[in-house]
Amino acid sequence: MDVIKSVQNQNGHASNNVGKKNESLNAVKRSINVEASGEFVIVPDQCHLLITVSSHKGSVSQAKDSVDRRVLYIKQAIQNAQIQVRTKAVQKSVVCQR
């Protein structure tokens, strides 16, 4: 014996299906699966840079002058490259070796 049954699909719309008594009342579930892959580049917005400058000269004052000139050159190179410096720290120490 055939019966007419009303079933709602996932969108909530009613549809009339003709079926037998033993058929399931569940509507067919419809789905769309989309898969993709790709590449992207993330440019870093920060870095931590540590530069060590040393000099070995005949006297302490010559070594200090050499290091100071090199530090100024490094600072100028960073400025010329238009690198924005948020935090800057310069630490100096003198080590005498005998």
Image (cartoon, grey):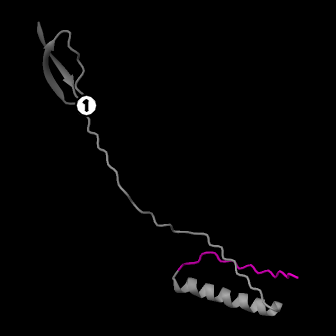
Quarter of the figure with residue 88: bottom right
Q: Main secondary structure of the magenta part?
A: loop
| Viewer-nearest residue: 96 or 6 | 96
- Give the answer, above or below, for where 79 lies relative to 10: below
- For the C terminus, the quadrant is bottom right
Residue beneath disc 1 = 10
Instruction: Give the residue at x 85% y 82%.
Output: 96
Crowding at mark 1 (Cα within 10 Å: few <14, some 14-19, many 20+): few
- Give the answer, above or below, for where 7 lies relative to 74: above
Q: Magenta segment, which residues?
A: 83-98
Q: How many marks?
A: 1
91 magenta-colored: yes
Quarter of the figure with residue 79: bottom right
Residue reaching furthest to the top: 1
Instruction: Give the residue at x 65% y 89%.
Output: 72
Residue reaching furthest to the right: 98
- Residue 1 percent across, percent down from the top left: 11, 6
- Give the answer, above or below, for where 37 lies relative to 67: above
Instruction: Give the residue at x 57% y 82%.
Output: 78
| Viewer-nearest residue: 82 or 18 | 82
- What's under tag 1, amino acid-wise? Gln
| Viewer-nearest residue: 35 or 27 | 35
Label 1: state its secondary structure: loop
- Residue 20 percent across, percent down from the top left: 15, 11
Q: Is 69 left, or right, of 63 in this rendering?
A: left
93 magenta-colored: yes
| Viewer-nearest residue: 36 or 52 | 52
Quarter of the figure with residue 46: bottom right
